[in-house]
Image (cartoon, helix red, strand yellow):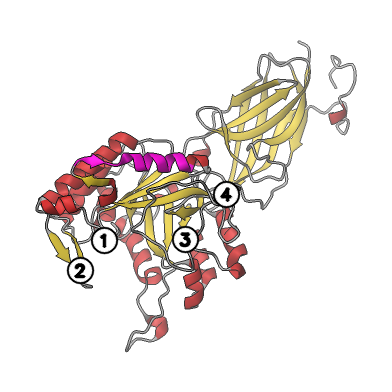
Amino acid sequence: MSKKLETISDWRKAYGVDEVVQRVRPYETDRLFRNPHKGTTTFQRFNGDPLYPDVQWSDRHGPLKFPAPKNSDLHNDRYPDTAIAYCRWVWSDLEQACGEYRWDIVEKAFATGAKRGQTVQVRIQPYVKKALPEWLLQLGARTVIDKDGNVGLDANCPIYKKHFKAMLRSFAKKFDGHPSLESFDVAYGGPFGETGGNATKATAEELVDVYFKSFKKTQLLVMLGSKGSYYAPKAYPNRKIGWRIDCIGDLRNEEHPGIPWNARWNHMYDQYPKSLATTGLHDAWKVAPVTMETCWTVSGWERLGFDVDYIIEEMYRYHTSVFMPKSCYVPEKWRLKFDELNRKLGYRFVIRQMKFPLESTVQKKIDIECSLDNVGVAPLYNSYDFALRFRQNKLDEIVRLSVAPRTWGPGKHWFGKKVSLPKNLKPGVVEIECSLVDHNQKASISFANEKTRDDHWLPLTKMDILFS
């Protein structure tokens, strides 16, 4: 104990008088934190809005109006808590006349998401069945007829390409890097924008180029298995390219004459492993997020008799960060499974131990060490800083450390740093907390430890500040 302290501080009486360091070991919690950039999403709606009835949903109807939430606490007993909303608008809703863009709809979606604690993933769909831009057809854009007799847009038509490019460039000029825009889907052709439609290899590359040349800041997600997902990694090797799929959980067992029920084609066995291997995106999860959307719905999986445990384990193996189950209810018997999935998706950081000195003067740098685990299945891909907060009377001082949480992939991590104490501290006891903070020094990400508060700060320990 320093001779410059007249009495032993109550908080450190358990330490011997000759001890100089303390080890702090916060307990892990299974609490779900609504941390950003990960977890389950709502679809075409936001936290507090009602779910779709039963097992039906609408790709066609992106939100155009934004009423007050039905549920004031934003919680839904039949759906996991979320920090992301996913919205898909058809092109004809956002460009109702040539060159007249309704970006106000997107702005209102971002504002609504911010109020409800959500960022927004976006896709602009070229068309959905009968929802085609009439003005584009009047300009002479070619159409195609699919195998089901539905009319669609010919992605190879010069008129289509010219105006689709113009729309994308306008969107990027307005929203690239917007803090509420979580990611943007590279959806250049076909119904829903999911497969690329009839786009040739040359057309796909031409349209994918517009995405990557127009969006410099926003995370782009290619549609796994489309021509664009083969082209983008080779054409833009220095970009952090994420990917998404629209049919996780497909273990189809519908009637198919001549093929045993357990030997029919499906996405889970036939498409995804092959697409990842052949696109070069197998290790993309290490630098960019993976998003998975249900085939049908979770409640649909129950009705079809699918193996939900296998589906969830596959999502873990693919290092999924974001799961989109279409805002349709989760069956009660599976709710705990999907709460656990929600916790493990993306990153989940647990402080195991931090080491501090018991005392110091403000003129000295203190040595600190931190051991932590990422018990999630993916990294944190966005820029945040590890920060300590020193609290003494009415004084709050935040000190950011030069460590990179983006490097904390699944598994164990350690760092040690010399930290300059805030100069405004006075002799006496100071409380120490930690969090991950954004560029404005706002605590934004909670550690999965028991005492973490709703303001994202985790109380750690105390330290004595001595007279110089």
Number of disc labels: 4
Q: Sequence-wise, which precedes: disc 3 or disc 4?
A: 4
Give, as a three-letter code, the residue at label 3.
Pro
Q: Position of residue 19 (x, y in %)?
A: 82, 28
For the residues marked 1 and 2, what is the alpha-carbon distance in whole angstroms?
Answer: 10 Å
| Residue 191: numbered disc | 1
SS class of the residue under badge 2? loop
Q: Position of residue 298 (x, y in %)?
A: 49, 67
Which residue is identified by label 4?
74
Measured in 3D between alpha carbons, the distance from the residue under mark 4 to the one under mark 2, in whole angstroms, is: 41 Å
In this picture, residue 58 sits left or right of residue 397: left
Most foreground residue, 134 or 453: 134
In three-dimensional space, the C-alpha distance between marks 1 and 4, rounded to whole angstroms, equals 32 Å
Q: Secondary structure at mark 1?
A: loop
In-image side of 199 versus 336 (left or right): left
Residue 382 horizontal/vertical position (percent)? 46, 39
* Res 145 visible: yes
Q: Which residue has dot 3 on it?
A: 325
